[in-house]
Image: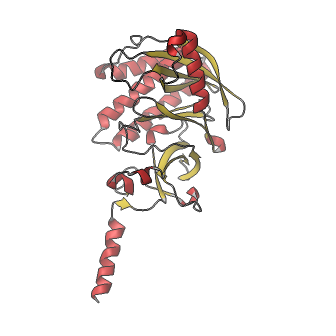
Amino acid sequence: MSGRISGIVLTLLWLHSPIVFGQAHFKRFPETVTNNGAYVLGWGLKDDPAGSVDSKTEIVADGPEKIDIESIGVDVETYERIEDYLVDTATGKIVATIPDFTYYAGSEGSENHFGLEVGWSPDNRGGIAIYQARYATDKVAWSNPTEHKTSNVWPQIEKAVRRVAVRKEGKEAADADYEISVSNPVFVRPRRVVMDAVVGALSSKKPDAPSYSFEILFDVKGNLDAPQLELASAKSVSDESGRDIGDNEIEAQLNKAYHKLATALPPRDRESLKQEQLKWLATREHITAAEKDKKESIQLRLTRRRVAELETRARYR
């Protein structure tokens, strides 16, 4: 009898445990949703080689459950099993794996998992995901959500950025040991994407360590399942060129950036921008509502990113 009771108790503890042990689960990165809300990036742990991501089930953001590493930490063996996904939001199913991405929730700001940025094309047929380590970019992936395809485009981007650095700054910027950080991917057309890039001794703690900053425009060529990113133009950017937006003025700056872009668009596209902005505001509200303890900081980060995106799109009209 006592054995039966013990079994019941263990079963109840398992059912109500906030930790989900095993690999057959995943979570979303809500900030990475496509413009139309149809796809989003997520993360989980690899199954055994014979397993399939098709059977993974989603853990909702505001639920009590956790993937085990969120509670017990990450060792080297567990880290090697982390993988990122492209997720269909309607079905809640994984449709593709992001190549070589091992970013996971709660890792923001750590040494090897400093940030994840995503920019989606206006037609939602392409996206750039940037995986940042602490000082430099670790990986960059392309996603074609509608076809459920992903590919590694970091070698292309790295080669192009180094070429720009030498062209703009001369042999001083040609050091093969210099690190590269790319950020803020913004699609100014369905097949044109702008990124910020920094080249230099980025991990050096010396205040006078050299670095060179650029804004680079790429044309997306070829098949959208695995495209070629062709360098279209580049310009040097000074460290003082961008003014930091204060917390108190961020909403005003958001409205200003939105209206500046709207004014530059033909009437037909203004309505599309209006609907896009309404969806973005709703997404921001949804994300921040689920993060009560960090609501203000997350809202500020999302809004800064949106302001930069709108301003970039206006510049490239």
Please provide percent x and percent y for residue 232. Answer: 64, 17
The residue drawn where x is 68% and y is 38% is 225
**Residue 123 located left or right of residue 81:** right
Q: Quadrant of the C terminus?
A: top right
> Relative to 92, does residue 160 appear above or below in the rendering?
above
Q: Quadrant of the N terminus?
A: bottom left
Please provide percent x and percent y for residue 203. Answer: 39, 26
Relative depth, front residue between 83 and 257: 83
Q: Is residue 264 visible?
A: no
The residue drawn where x is 41% and y is 23% is 202
Relative depth, front residue between 99 and 106: 99
Q: Residue furthest bottom?
A: 1
> Relative to 98, does residue 267 appear above or below in the rendering?
above
Count of marks placed on residues = 0
**Residue 106 located left or right of residue 82:** left
The residue drawn where x is 67% and y is 36% is 226
The residue drawn where x is 42% and y is 15% is 210
> Relative to 296, does residue 256 appear above or below in the rendering?
above
**Residue 95 located left or right of residue 224:** left
Please provide percent x and percent y for residue 148. Answer: 63, 45
Q: Is residue 286 visible?
A: yes
Please provide percent x and percent y for residue 271. Answer: 56, 25
> Relative to 77, does residue 227 appear above or below in the rendering?
above
Relative depth, front residue between 209 and 11: 209
Q: Quadrant of residue 235?
A: top right
